[in-house]
Image (cartoon, rainbow, N blue to C red):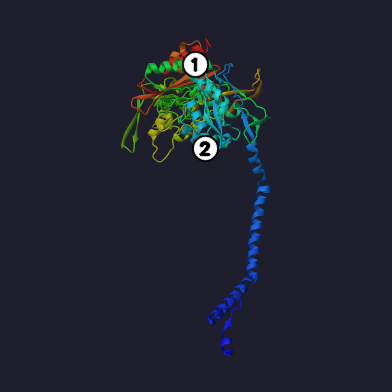
Amino acid sequence: MNSFFQKKRINASSKTEIEPHEIFLDRLAQEREEEFNQKIEVPIVKRKFFVLKVIFFFLFLVLLGKTFQFQVYENSKFEELARNNRERIYQIQAPRGIIYDKNMKQLVFNKPAYDLVCDKRDLSKNLSERLKKIETVASIIKEDPETIQTRIEEEDFPLVLVSENLAHETLIVLEAKINELFGFQIKENTIREYTDENLSHVLGYTGKVTKDDLNNNPNYFITDYIGRAGIEQYYEEVLRGESGKLMIEKNALGDEMSRNLISQVEDGKNLVSNLDSELQTKLTQELKASLKRVGASSAVAIAIDPRGGEVLSLVSLPEFDNNLFSQGFTSEQWKDISDDEKKPFFNRAISGFGYPTGSVIKPLIGIAALEEGIISEHTKIYCPLEICVWNRYLEKDECFEDWTFHGLSDIKRAIAESVNTFFYIIGGGYESFKGLGAEKIIKYLDLFNWGEGTGIDLPQEGKGILPEIGNSWRLGDTYHLSIGQGPFTATPIEVTTAFAAIANGGKLYEPHIAKEIVDSSDNLKVIEEITPKIIRENFIDSENIEIIREGMRQTVTAGSAVSLNSLAITSAAKTGTAESSKEEHYHHWICVFAPYENPEIVLTVVIEDIEGIKSATLPVVKEVLRWYFSEH
């Protein structure tokens, strides 16, 4: 009985019996619970706690560093960003300076214009609303809305030029709707208006600033114009002035709260040039008439005052309409101009590497021979119709002809009648007569700055090319060089500058177009005078220069320019004809100065690619000189 109760327990509450296996399971559950409670209460290992503290400390340092960066180190940056959200700086365009000729005739005008500009900061953040505004603008200015949208999105600057030089009808519609087009604004502007196409190469033109211009010139505005060629480019800093600055403060809704003028507008300075616009017109007219007469299309004329290097006229034909660049042109117009084989944008007077000079080189060869003692004023040389020398490459005689037989000649007659064989002999030598040689010829051409550029105050001046004397150079090459043929060229401005030095007795001046810079007041007060700059002087004996001058005078009285002798004014000249790259075509030159006794003008005319030998340049200078010293 007792053993029975030891093996069996009675549940007092339920009065039911508990089986032995239930006692076992209950004991097992109790042990598991105790084991679980022990694991929960085990403290964290100290090493793990240290790692957690380091991580939290590092995160705190990062947070503290970022706070310092934003609040202290980059405080000004974020202040500026916040300020930009409420303060906008707008530029007030300065009127561009005016360009005058030497007689104070205005050569360029400022014409009012209007541009449509988008301020990206004011555009709606809602995409559909923003696109709706763009579509409205596109319908008014008649442009594709996707193109406008792309232009706005891709622009790095907050202000975007949407449309320039708005047509009058378009401007009226925009002004009526501009208050509804939040983010768009009409900006008043000025554009250049040029009165004479014949001044296009010397005045140049202005064009709208590009992204590169804005990056390089922070003081420029998206609607500004910048000089792209000619005087407009060379004297950009003088002409453009200083824009004013206006600060407009806006609230969070974009409404204007106030406006304050930060800096005043400073008008561009005016420039008085040495150009004689009437002479420019006359030269252009006579050149065009000659081109028509001889069937050519391109020509150059340069007039310089030899007393100081002042450029009186500079004509390059064909010309172009420089108003197109500021007032706009169609894609068809641009294609017509850019594809034109005559290259109207190319300034033939100063750019590129020039032309072969033909016989206008002969006065310089004569100076070199006199300076080196090869000849004197009285040296006479027998000049046959041709001279022949042995060509070791061809293994036979090579002959160099004259255009006619001259016989005995001195330096003056050789210049006047353009005696080729005389210059062959003094240039390269012949039989027992020792000539200059190519190296000395190049030395004197270099002294007159051929191949060096002149430093004229116009951009993109080119340089002529003087030949390189190598192992393959032969005597025949020296002969060709002595009469202005072969592998060398000079620009018309280089030639004119050299002849100005002959005219004035030996001073090589840097040619300059600007005469003075004046302010924008009514009385045009002179701010700066542009003084003549001498490149070189006293580099040629004055007596030798006078001998050459007399030879050039003889060219007019009895030589190749004798038709000029009928003028009331005395003059001296040198003509030249150089082979062109086209077969049976020639470049015709003439350089003349007048009056002979005290020259006031040096005039160079070049007409390109004339088929055959025709009188082309002489009639031009004759008519221009007659006009200049009588009716002018």
Report which quarter residue 317 is drawn in: top left
The spot of residue 345 in percent (x, y) is 46, 26
- With respect to residue 299, does 77 lie above or below? below
The spot of residue 166 in percent (x, y) is 52, 24
Amino acid residing under circle 2: Leu
The spot of residue 502 in percent (x, y) is 52, 23
- Residue 56, visible in the rendered structure: yes
The spot of residue 185 in percent (x, y) is 57, 28
Q: Give the class, few, some or many, for how many residues have Cα within 10 Å of label 1's Cα (few <14, many ≥20).
A: some
- Residue 506, visible in the rendered structure: no
Report which quarter residue 392 is drawn in: top left
Amino acid residing under circle 1: Thr
Q: Give the class, few, some or many, for how many residues have Cα within 10 Å of label 2's Cα (few <14, many ≥20).
A: few
- With respect to residue 43, does 313 lie above or below? above
Q: Which mark is residue 127?
A: 2
Judge depth for marks 1 and 2 and give the one in front.
2
Q: Which residue is mark 1?
A: 281
Q: Return the residue nearer the eye: 176 or 197.
A: 176
Q: Are marks 1 and 2 in contact (CB under 8 Å)?
A: no
Q: Quadrant of the N terminus?
A: bottom right
Earlier residue among tags 1 and 2:
2
- With respect to residue 612, does 85 lie above or below? below
Q: Give the SS element for disc 2.
A: helix
Q: Give the SS element for disc 1.
A: helix
